[in-house]
Image (cartoon, coloured by chain):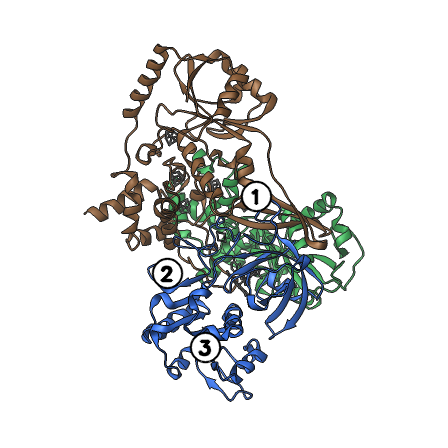
Chain colours: A blue, B green, C brown
Amino acid sequence: MSPIPTVGSVYVPSPARVAKVKALTVMEKLFTIELPWGQSLGHQPGQFVEVSLFGIGEAPISISSSPSRSNGVFELCVRKVGDVTGALHGLEEGATIGVRGPMGTGFPVEKFRGKDILFAPGGLGLAPARSLINQVLDERGSFGRVMILYGARNPAELLFKDELEAWRQRSDVEFLVTVDRSDESWTGNVGVITTLFKHVVVNPRNTVAVTIGPPVMYRFVLMELLGKGIPERQIWMSLERRMKCGVGKCGHCQINNLYCCQQGPAFNYAQIKGVEEAI
Amino acid sequence: MIGDLMKPKVAFFDFTSCEGCQLTVVDSLQTHVDLLDAVEIVQFREAMTEKGEDYAIAFVEGSISRASDEARLRRIREQAAIVVALGACAHLGGINAIRNAQPLDDVRKYVYGDKADWYETYPARPISAVVKVDAVIPGCPIDRDEFIGVVKALLLGKKPPLPDYPVCVECKRKENVCVFHKGGFCLGPVIRAGCGAICPTCGDGCEGCRGLIPNPNQDSMSDVLVKYGLTVADMLARWTMFGTYQQMEAGS
Amino acid sequence: MSLRMIDKGSMAAFVSNLLQAYEVVGPRAKDSQYAFGRITDYDQLRLDYNTTILPPKKYLLPQEEVLFTFQTEGMSAAPVFDTRPRVIFGVHTCDIHALHLLDAVFATGQRDEHYLERRAATLIVGIECLTPCDEHSFCKSMGTLSASEGFDLHLTDLGDRYAVEVGTPAGEALLARYAANHGAGESEVGLLDKMLSEKWPRFSYRLDFDGNELPALMAVSYKNPIWKELEGRCLACGSCNLVCPTCYCFDVQDRVSMDRKTGERIRVWDSCQLAEFARVGSGENFRKTRAERQRHRFFRKGKYIPDMHGELGCVGCGRCARACLVDITPVGVWNALHKAHTA
Ligand SMILES: Cc1cc2nc3c(=O)[nH]c(=O)nc-3n(C[C@H](O)[C@H](O)[C@H](O)COP(=O)(O)OP(=O)(O)OC[C@H]3O[C@@H](n4cnc5c(N)ncnc54)[C@H](O)[C@@H]3O)c2cc1C
Ligand code: SF4
Ligand code: SF4
Ligand code: SF4
Ligand code: SF4
Ligand code: SF4
Ligand code: FES
């Protein structure tokens, strides 16, 4: 059950405070959200919340912070694309928003313990992936190798630059990053995310892959992961769909018979392989 | 973006039109007096004589049918942060565009008789053919509630609502008996909703004053009109009532 | 449960008694067709109706409903529930089945109290169809030509009286309190049996197969060329969804006051046939073509819903077929799929 009271209706959000706003890029801002009375959200990595601004509307946003770092707040990384996300970008610290959640099914972290984990987020996909990455890093001892392959369109669009730098410097993390198009400041890899896969050698049986990105990316990344022999059930994704309710009623998020807001947004490839509309 | 967010200045302008849409605005001001607490009207020929030039939102009625209209419209565009096309003439060229399908000289003679050469005129065009338009309020005339809705959205910094689904949706929500079931004809399945399906609700077929939805299946709609008994010529005539400019653009 | 009788002469009093305690809605004439509407006088009630443009679903999931009201300052909100006691009078058995399905949908997983609160305040008085409503219905194929549950009371016209089957204790109380009625004598039971058995052959199976085979048929029909064929005809007008008693997809919107301080969040009926139904903020549209959307519609009715709720997602009421200007019908589509599969 959700720790946020729903006042008799699953559609009514609870007020929450914007404790901090930080611009990550021109398009993305990171919001630190505080629930009333120091409640913790109690989420799983991969879950999302429905964020409301009354009068503007509601939008599903992945929880970007790790449950291991909750202490009464959680983080949302929001790209400005329209009404709700645009209005969120206009908010200042101390503002009030409405929140419902956590919603959906996240990644089964417990099943990942003891395994090597290969993260392959693209673009904004790092926002939800970061929740799991940071949990794994905070509980580093209970996981095997940690590999992070991250791709962005250009250097200016790289998210969480401080954290990327920290990951790069850790000896217990294998970190690679690439951009589709470089600029004069960039000295690293250039090319789409799939060009990074040749640099990692994995034990497919013991590896869990977590890839999150736009639909086009999945087709190519999946080929790489399957090509490395990683079993279908160990390849995890997060799918984006239009969502109007988040509670399995409005029908907008349906992927054939699956409700993305209920059975997902996190799915393993075995679950969605035969589902024609999935990827 | 629109200056004083609390109370932006707005102005109304008209080009070739019947001014029916502006009358609807005047009407809305009567039923929504609080509108005047939310915005400051600095120019509105229909309702006042003063003329303020520092407007942030311009509502433009009418189609562009003369070269001299263009310069005036461009000046409006330069001043206003937001330009809204008000009504079918500004949005689609409106009824004025029917003449586009005929040779211009004939139109001029028909309308102005032997004084035809005195008037400069060219095919009627929507204002979007001349300047960038930020929002449209379709309809002939516009729908009062939709006008209010657009003003509210602009005040909230939201994109103004513009339904992308057809009139049938609103018609069915109202549980109307379908005009086709009463022996009439209706363009509702391919015309943009937002009017509350007012014509079918009154028992008349939709004439398409709000323009086509994105990706309309016009071929199938034409088949329906003919299947229900229209001649091909009548069917084609229905498409031109409000659709001439859109049709000709699509065809060119 | 038990069987009671109401003489037709007592019906007007029954309805006017109900009006003291309930809002009564039922089929009324609308132009040449019928629509459920508020009944304030027994004469308005047209129990002889064939079918209605919209199903009685609109009293449980209205075309437009306020979910909650809000104040933008402080983001405070108060949910809105409609708990007005209401009797839906004269519901045909296809619609009874449809409501039964919706009850399951809104109670499964996270409960939708807006629907469920309304439902709890609603009593359903059904009425048996003795002849097919029109050429579009195919209730017999879908197993909805009769109903053994899902109503509080259920009427069958026996000529000068109605046989009333009592479905729930609430229905029993309603009858006891508001209607002059009597127990069914042996001859009345016999007459009812005769009416019901004689009605059966008047209806035809319009599907070439048993409706219960639909999920299996759909399972092998995903790649059938028929979806492409529908692409050319379908207008993407949404009418088929909007008139369907088992469709429940909705859109959510905010409405604000002019000073933007207060407002309400509403939900409105939506349709998966509309072009933008599955478009996301980043621009991707996951069901771009009319073919994909038609396939989704028919899969929802024939497979997804039955897989999830154990009941078919179509009750054979024929409303979508009546509404579709290009004659896309479940009977046509499903028989074509069946033919393709058995050929
Ligand atoms: C599970 C999940 C997790 C997500 N996580 C994140 C996250 O962590 N961070 C994040 O930034 N986003 C995330 N998203 C995406 C986010 O929900 C959307 O970007 C958001 O809903 C957009 O809402 P909006 O009101 O800002 O945009 P809208 O105003 O609704 O529209 C955005 C854009 O889409 C276009 N558009 C919208 N509707 C239509 C239409 N009908 N026809 C044509 N174009 C249209 C508009 O032109 C506009 O440019 C997630 C989505 C899901 C489903
Ligand atoms: S009357 Fe027109 S708008 Fe209404 S359902 Fe029929 S075709 Fe559609
Ligand atoms: S029904 Fe059609 S013609 Fe009538 S107002 Fe609406 S769009 Fe215009
Ligand atoms: S009613 Fe007919 S034309 Fe309209 S969306 Fe449905 S199938 Fe297509
Ligand atoms: S799909 Fe058509 S026939 Fe089936 S329940 Fe819906 S409206 Fe009735
Ligand atoms: S579909 Fe069958 S049960 Fe429904 S109204 Fe028609 S005849 Fe009656
Ligand atoms: S978002 Fe409404 S059903 Fe999933």
The yes-or-no answer for disc 2 within 8 Å of ligand 1 is no
The yes-or-no answer for disc 3 within 8 Å of ligand 1 is no
The subunit letter for the residue under badge 2 reads A
Q: Where the C terminus of chain A falls, by quadrant?
A: bottom left
3 vs 2, front mark: 3
- From the image, tell me which residue sits under label 1: B196
Q: CA distance from mark 2 to mark 1?
A: 40 Å
Q: Position of residue C179 (x, y in %)?
A: 52, 16
Tell me if mark 1 has few (under 14), some (14-19) or many (20+) residues whose alpha carbon lies within 10 angstroms of its own. some
Q: Amino acid at mark 3?
A: Val
Taking the image as shown, residue C201 lies to the left or right of residue B198, namely left
- From the image, tell me which residue sits under label 3: A146
- Check chain identity for marks 2 and 1: say if they share one: no
Mark 3 or mark 2, earlier in chain: 3
Q: Nearer the viewer, residue B37 or C309?
A: C309
Specify the label residue B184 is tagged with: none
Q: In this picture, is A83 found above or below C119?
A: below
Q: Amino acid at mark 2?
A: Ile
Tell me if mark 3 has few (under 14), some (14-19) or many (20+) residues whose alpha carbon lies within 10 angstroms of its own. many
Q: In this picture, is C243 found above or below A159?
A: above
> Is residue A113 among the parts visible in the rendering?
yes
Q: Nearer the viewer, residue A65 or A186?
A: A65
The yes-or-no answer for disc 1 within 8 Å of ligand 3 is yes
The subunit letter for the residue under badge 1 reads B
Q: Secondary structure at mark 1?
A: loop
Tell me if mark 2 has few (under 14), some (14-19) or many (20+) residues whose alpha carbon lies within 10 angstroms of its own. some
Q: Secondary structure at mark 3?
A: strand
> Is residue B183 among the parts visible in the rendering?
no
